[in-house]
Image (spheres, rainbow, N blue to C red):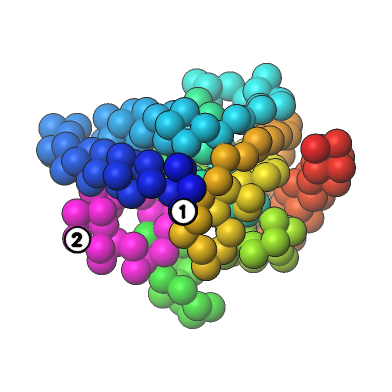
Amino acid sequence: MTLQTLLFFLVVLPVMFFGLLIGLVVNIIDPSGDGFHRMAAWWGRFCRKLMGITVEITGGENYDPNSNYLIMSNHAGMADIPLILGSIHLNMRFVAKEELGKIPIFGWAIKRGGYVLIKRGQNREALKSLLMASEVLKTGRSVHIFPEGTRSETGKILPFKRGAFMIAQKAHAPILPVTIIGSNRITPKKSLRIRKSRVQIIISEPIEARGKKAQELQDAAYTAITGNMKKYGAAG
């Protein structure tokens, strides 16, 4: 068992648990979810420092912290969410699986915090829940989604699902493509062993969604994310 694994169970999880309890109260005081996001961003930075993860950010000048975007990134590891929260300075909400909302305390906190919980599948109800993210974007907040729909076991980018791009189309929100390299080495899928790692986060220029079809947006985002994976992954 590594030191990082011990720290995760002895420090990170207890801090997250008590933070979620505080978050429930914060969400009552501030139902917009903005206060909860500030807590989540702090937690992301705390996890990164405690676990000894080095993050190198490229392209930070490609977004405006005062604007809002549909953030799309590949999903390479369990640490992706805290890394994004702590590294990208946007007031964001995450799209998450509906099942997570059923977890006591955790689910209550993220639902109250404005996270978008989606149903799985290809039916009308699943699409309706996914498009709720466009309503969040219309409030001026950013939304993050993993267009692959699941975590890659090897770090290799999986095919993107089209539904994610219908959100941008409906909300007319620019897509901010983000490439994550190296997070799969922190915690391999189906493993609880946690290790130090160097992670690269590459932020591409936004993709304007207005006037474009979902397939066009999907192709553009995939090209941006995979292109940076090839460019920076080879260098790393």
Which residues are the magenta region? 95-116
Q: Residue at x 80, y 37 (%)?
A: 236
Choose between 158 and 95: the one closer to the eye.
158
**103 vs 53: above or below:** below
Q: Is residue 41 left or right of residue 224?
A: left
- Which of discs 2 and 1 lies nearer the camera? The answer is 1
Classify mark 1: residues with Cα within 10 Å, few (<14), some (14-19) or many (20+). few
In the rendering, which numbered label is found on residue 44?
none
Classify mark 2: residues with Cα within 10 Å, few (<14), some (14-19) or many (20+). few
Judged from the image, the secondary structure of the residue bearing numbered disc 2 is loop
Amino acid residing under circle 2:
Pro
Amino acid residing under circle 1:
Met
Q: Position of residue 18 (x, y in %)?
A: 19, 41
Q: Is residue 83 left or right of residue 220?
A: left
**96 vs 85: above or below:** below
In this rendering, does residue 10 appear at all? yes
User: Looking at the image, which residue sits at the far front?
Assistant: 1
Q: Of callouts 2 and 1, which one flags the residue occurring earlier in the amino acid sequence?
A: 1
Q: Residue at x 38, y 54 (%)?
A: 116
Q: Residue at x 31, y 31 (%)?
A: 39
Q: Quadrant of residue 147?
A: bottom right
In this rendering, does residue 168 appear at all? no
Q: Position of residue 27 (x, y in %)?
A: 19, 39
Identify residue for label 1: 1
Q: Position of residue 21 (x, y in %)?
A: 16, 43
Identify residue for label 2: 104
Judged from the image, the secondary structure of the residue bearing numbered disc 1 is loop
Q: CA distance from mark 2 to mark 1?
A: 28 Å
Q: Quadrant of residue 129?
A: bottom left
